[in-house]
Amino acid sequence: MTDEDPADGVDEADASPYTLQRADDGDEHHAFWADDVADRIVDREPSEPIVIKGGISPSGVPHLGNVNEIMRGYYVAEVLRERGHEVRQVFTADDRDPLRKLPRTLCDLEGTLVDLGDVNAGALGRNLGAPYTDIPDPFGCCDSYGDHFSQIIADSADAVDVPIDLLSNTDLYEAGEFDEVTRYVLEHADRAREVLAEYQDTVDADGDYVPFNPICSACGKVTETVTGVDLEAEPPTVDYVCTDMDAGDQTIGGCGHEGTATIREGKMPWRFEWPAQWQILGVDFEPFGKDHAEGSWPSGQDVSRNVLEKEPPVPMVYEWFTLDGEPFSSSAGNVILVSDVLELIEPDVLRYFFAKDPSKARDFSVERLDQLVDEFDRFEAIYFGEVEASEDEREFAERVYPLVVEEPREDRIRLPYTFAAVLGMTDDPDLREEIARREGHIADDAPEWAVEGALARVDRARNWARRTGNEFDYELKRTTLPDHEFDAATEAALDELADFVAADDDLEPDALQGEIYETAKRHDVPVGDFFAAGYRLFFDDEQGPKLGPFLAKVDREFVVDRLRRER
Ligand SMILES: [Zn+2]
Ligand SMILES: [Zn+2]
């Protein structure tokens, strides 16, 4: 919107989508941002059900970044439901959008990343410019390219336990849901052109731009050159010529076909389609990323108010987050799917991540996932009043924790994540439990479900160690003695260390670490070689974790026997 545009009568503050950053209402702020947003929605006295929307063009790998939008909408939906409102959370697959460029990376339904070269890239290349739902699924498992990626989004929402109505834009067009608003926009094409010309230099306010893109019946591509409109037909039709489409750094060639399409056989351009979705779905709230805040939101709210004459939904810009410090990029391989994340952390921890303030940029660090898990564990402990916390932390935990977990259960047990990673060095479930009990993390009277929940984290921490190759990525070779060859001095030192371990039934981790050094020195074995001998015996590796503290955690008989090379 510009200053020279008095017609709309909307002040700048109302048009700003930075809902969370605004402090213009003088209201008390809640401990949870979703309550602030809910206030704003309820202030407008919306009809029920209140509709919350999100959306994505299913163009490639649907990764963790895309789930941001679903989770943000979810928290607002939950807060409104808690206040007694009926809420519908919809998510549109904007799958009538044309494929504008070939993605470098795709993924199958299991979330495995696949290079473009490993699927039928030629078939995809021939379909540049066609709607996603008209392109064959490169994996052959779903009805179309669009359906394939929509399925992954649906699975991701399921995995974080968020109920969404996933709607296909193509289905909405084909069912005639867009008929009325499309006809209206075509009837008011002059006004549509005037509004859009303020945002797009390529559109001339007095030109012949028509806000509709039919699908060419000859080549199947979405075309942009409309030569006539017949609003008397039922449904209305447009005449078109299939011309070239400008797709960023390349041109997608049109076939030259001249034809006629109904308004169900095409789509509105995004800047009209988005506000049209708000209208036909009755959207009351929509969160979106910064790209839309500077791009299609300013034009969308203007189109909504001044072409469709409808109030746009309450907007909310959320910050993107980075992955290990870099932007998400499926082509650069910097991408992680929800299914991958849930192999590393519990769904509760991921849901917690998205409960944090959306107006702050954050990093999702796989390398330092232990920090996020520790933070969640503390948040949980604050809720149960088990640790000291500031007033703000306590208010946040009390409000948000019940929304993050399925059910607050005070008896739950959380093994510290890095401790779980240490336990993950052995795949023996009994040993894992024994060590966790011995170290005081599991009480004697702990309920069975809590023990199971605690130990389930060990597998996740083990996956984390494997994925990152970090200092916990070692595997205790418990069942078979690894091949080894030591000189006499080393063997004597190992035997003496075994005696030391056997003699003390309550070994201090640091004491054992010190004794390893001392034993090596007494036998004139270089310290590095002596540690290497230990890593060989226990991990069949040249290196490993800090040996003393680790061995102090493992059962003593096994350690003694292994140092003596007996089993
Ligand atoms: Zn598929
Ligand atoms: Zn064509």
Image (cartoon, helix red, strand yellow):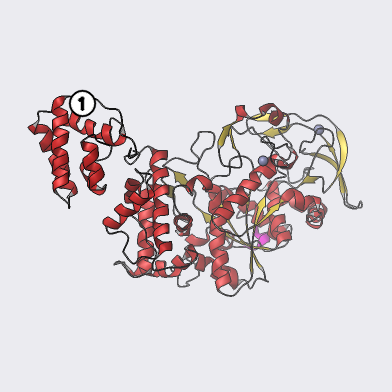
Q: Which of 164 and 208 is in front in this view?
A: 164
Residue ID for mark 1: 486
The furthest residue to the front: 566
Magenta residues, start to end: 1-10
Q: Which quarter of the picture shows residue 383?
A: bottom left
Q: Is the magenta stretch mostly helix, strand or loop?
A: loop
4 within the magenta span:
yes
Binning the other alpha carbons within 10 Å of mark 1 as few (below 14), some (14 to 19) or many (20 upward) gives few
- Residue 191 appears at what percent x and percent y? 76, 53
* Residue at the image position 56 percent from the left and 74 percent from the top: 83
On screen, 2 above or below 427?
A: below
Name the element at disc 1.
loop
In the rendered structure, the answer to whether residue 463 lies left or right of residue 425 reads: right
Q: How many marks?
A: 1
The furthest residue to the bottom: 84
Q: Which of 353 and 517 is in front in this view?
A: 517
* Residue at the image position 91 percent from the left and 51 percent from the top: 233
- Residue 316 appears at what percent x and percent y? 55, 58
* Residue at the image position 61 percent from the left and 60 percent from the top: 163
Kind of residue at badge 1: Phe
On screen, 164 above or below 510?
A: below
Residue 554 appears anywhere in the view: yes
Q: Which of 312 and 418 is in front in this view?
A: 418
In the rendered structure, the answer to whether residue 431 lies left or right of residue 72 reads: left
Q: Which quarter of the picture shows residue 287?
A: bottom right
- Residue 45 appears at what percent x and percent y? 63, 73
Residue 193 appears anywhere in the view: no
On screen, 262 above or below 381?
A: above
Splitting the image into four quadrants, where does ligand 1 fall? top right
Which quadrant of the figure contains the C terminus? Answer: top left
343 within the magenta span:
no
Which quadrant of the figure contains the N terminus? Answer: bottom right
